[in-house]
Amino acid sequence: GENVEQHPSTLSVQEGDSAVIKCTYSDSASNYFPWYKQELGKRPQLIIDIRSNVGEKKDQRIAVTLNKTAKHFSLHITETQPEDSAVYFCAANPRGGTSYGKLTFGQGTILTVHP
Amino acid sequence: DAEITQSPRHKITETGRQVTLACHQTWNHNNMFWYRQDLGHGLRLIHYSYGVQDTNKGEVSDGYSVSRSNTEDLPLTLESAASSQTSVYFCASRPQGMQPQHFGDGTRLSIL
């Protein structure tokens, strides 16, 4: 089955700096990669996603890049703000087989943005 | 608006009791999932379903069961609650294909 590794587990930045979180996946057939943000005591919420036919996607201060050859994808947050502080999860979706439709999540990154 | 709701939001029970957590979605999604979230373990998949009458075990299914009698609901049952099952439980659903998965607000379950 799919295996997703996420790094770093914790990340601390100053307000205004950029933050980068990286994930690697094992199943070369995976075709969809969402990122979720989870604030304390809340549900995980989708912030951005990318499909395997695209190399990069951007939404305001957030961007995701995908390298299919190396099997890794990254979340980039620019001009960080204190409200970006949360736990971030990456995930991968296998294309077929018995895992189809079932996202595999990374272990999460605790991002802290200091004012 | 379509949504996914979990109930109860909080529950305290005793070891050995049977507990059922409800999950209801109005998106008409075929795929539904149950996760538990514990500090240091991220989101761990308990059970999932790809449609009515379909159920599958996830990575931490021991002590849990689900049933899918209709598209909207996937209740999670703890047959005999154990203290190790104290956790936050999230239900989620998504449509087929390369589409996002949406989570409910979670149920905080404490087993004393």
Image (cartoon, rainbow, N blue to C red):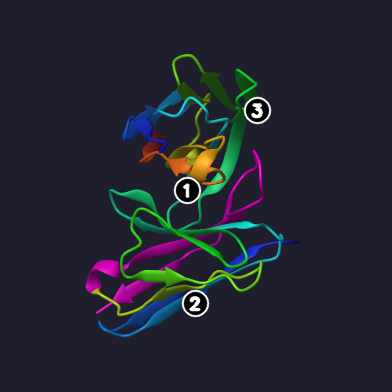
Q: State which quarter of the image contains the C terminus of chain B.
A: bottom left
To the question of a shared chain for discs 3 and 1, the answer is: yes
Q: Are marks 3 and 2 in contact (CB under 8 Å)?
A: no
Q: Residue at x 45, y 21 (%)?
A: A71
Residue at the location (35% across, 62% down)? B61
- The quadrant holding residue B4 is bottom right
Q: Position of residue B90 (x, y in %)?
A: 47, 61
Indicate left or right for A74 with B37 as reference. right
Q: Residues within 10 Å of mark 1 (few under 14, many from 20)?
A: some
Q: Is residue A13 left or right of residue B111?
A: right
Q: Which mark is residue B8?
A: 2
A105 in the magenta segment: no
In which quarter of the view is residue A85 placed?
top left
Labels 3 and 1 touching (C-beta < 8 A): no
User: Of residues B17 and B37, which is closer to you in this image?
Assistant: B17
Q: Which mark is residue A38?
A: 1
Q: Who is closer to the viewer here, B77 or B12?
A: B77
Mark seen at residue A60: 3
Which chain does the residue under circle 3 lie in? A
Looking at the rendering, the stretch of residues picked out in magenta corresponds to B83-112
Residue B65 in picture, x, y percent from top left: 42, 70
Query: Gap between marks 3 and 1, in whole Å?
Result: 19 Å
**Amino acid on which the number 2 mark rests in the picture:** Pro
Mark 3 surroundings within 10 Å by alpha-carbon count, few (fewer than 14), some (14 through 19), many (20 or more): few
Q: Earlier along the polypeptide chain: callout 3 or callout 1?
A: 1
Relative to B9, is A28 above or below? above
Name the mark on residue A6.
none
C-alpha span from label 3 to label 2: 36 Å
Q: Residue furthest top?
A: A69
Q: Secondary structure at mark 1?
A: strand
Residue A55 located left or right of residue A88: right
